[in-house]
Image (spheres, helix red, strand yellow):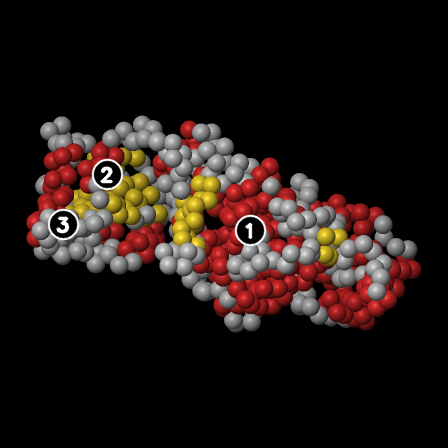
Amino acid sequence: MVPDVSTGSDTRGLIAYLFGPGRRDEHTDSHIVAAWDMAGAPDPGRDPAATYTQLAKRLDHHVDLRTRELGGKKPPQHVWHCPVRTAPGDRYLTDTEWAEVARRIVHATGIAPEGDEKACRWIAVRHADDHIHIMATTVRADGRRPRTHHDGQRAQAECRKIEAEFGLRRLKSGDLTAPRTPTGAERAKAERQGQTVTARHWLREQAYAVAAAVRTEADYFTVLQSLGIKVKTRLGPETGDVIGYSLAAPGDTNATGEPVWYGGSKLAPDLSINRLRERLPDQKVADHPRYVADPADPWRHTTTAIHAARTVLDSGDDAAAQGHLAAFGDALYNIASATTGPHRAELRAAAMAFNRARRSATRADHQAATALRKAAKELAYASNEPGGLAIALLFATAHLARAAAKWHEQRGHAQQAAAAEEALRHLQAGYQQAATPVLADLTRRAPRAATARRFEQDVRAALPDHADRILSDPTWTALTTTLAHAETAGHNPRRLLGEVGAQRELDSAEHPAEVLNWRITAQPNRRTQVARSRSTISGTSSMPATPHPPATPVAMRPEEYGRHR
């Protein structure tokens, strides 16, 4: 059951909407199911003699009284509105049950405490099977305003109790860090225009993806504009610095043809200018081009940083953990943008799902996650996807998403835990799509039996407590191929197995050989490192450096994410 509290100032306008046909003729049998006084509340839905004006006057009686007392100044935002909707799949509620829901909501929120004869006047209107609208004028009979502090949270808490008592689907409680949901009007507009998502949702995803890839605040606005998104900044009156911004989707206009603007914080709490600056310092990037000696480095660095983030979640430092979850949210966008193949859609879905898990009421220490964020941003400029190393990164992301779900669950962050679980499902699906053919190929190219027996001895010597499970794992043969590659790259297999096996415990791993396979895949080529070190000492390079492209990151190309129109 979902309540959605808001305020306004147009009593009659809201009444006309509640009893009218709706924006798409979706309202049927509009009528009052509960009110401050059922005998004194005219019902335009059931009483032919009742009018919108009569009902508005009855509701606004005490507002008018208060207005006279204040010398003609009507209190601002004096109309309180709270739609309450059952979840999809919930049973049908009768008018009597909805009336009880309404009375409990106005009591819990302070609009009309039970037994308070001087409480605000209110009505609950039903015009569909699955929801009601509670409307009140927030001036009491004694002229005072009601105590509605944290009314949204109190309505949520009461709905959780109602769900349990009425046998309805138990939804997750929020913590005021969720983004605003699209309004009914926004959804209807998207449907009319043939769009699958609303402009608000589309803009939010573009903003997240751009923020994940760019390095500065200036780049953030530049890339957004390159996507056709209109950007409007608000400047401070004294300093002239940017103190806020709004975005408008291409072609999204109102009735007068003006762009429909959405403030950054209205898209999501962590897209406000202040929250962005915490992870996008407004500093100039060095003018000289950025180089990477090995194109695989961004993938390897991100994998290492994600493994480190997993350790932070277990450290007990909640601020640092929250900072790493925010950085992980950025990383998922950049991993998806740098990935090729059919599993890319799953990675994008994972990034979007994890947005709800990237923030909570715990204030994030973004500086603690600098290494992960820096490594992930390199992926926005990566020029290729290095096969097994990319799958090793994907394998690591799934484990971190699972750890994130557990971290949130332990702290009572129900919505965030559910979002992390959803992201995990997408990551697992993407991993299976990408890894299955690669593991099959590794198995097909297994080394000779003598080499495999030698690796078996290495496993028993390096990881004696896990050896039997590793050797019976269906992916053991694939691991022998990976060990052979590592040996060719200059690693000692026995020493390497001991090192990667100690990174994290293997007891909980369902397929320990698979875990070891991707941990070893993520290790750098020792022979290449030695050659690179020698060339540096001699002042020459054994391989050409690869510059990052200075253009817009690949993740942000309009054709990759789709235009609103």
In the image, is 550 to the left or to the right of 155? Answer: right
Mark 3: amino acid: Lys
Calculate the distance from the C-alpha at mark 2 to the C-alpha at mark 3.
21 Å
Residue closer to the observer: 164 or 317: 317
Calculate the distance from the C-alpha at mark 2 to the C-alpha at mark 1.
42 Å
In the image, is 460 to the left or to the right of 560? Answer: right
Mark 1: amino acid: Asp
Query: What residue is pinned by disc 1?
Result: 219
Tag nearer the camera, 2 or 1: 1
| Vertical order, 49 against 548 (above or below) | above
Residue 108, percent across and down? 25, 56
Query: What residue is pinned by disc 2?
Result: 14
Calculate the distance from the C-alpha at mark 3 to the C-alpha at mark 1.
46 Å
Q: Are marks 3 and 1 in contact (CB under 8 Å)?
A: no
Tag nearer the camera, 3 or 1: 1
User: In the image, what residue occupies the spot 19% across and 32% down?
Assistant: 45
Q: Earlier in the sequence, mark 2 or mark 1?
A: 2
**Which mark, by number, is residue 176?**
none
**Which mark, by number, is residue 73?**
3
The secondary element bearing badge 3 is classed as loop
Q: Is residue 550 something one can see in this rendering?
A: yes
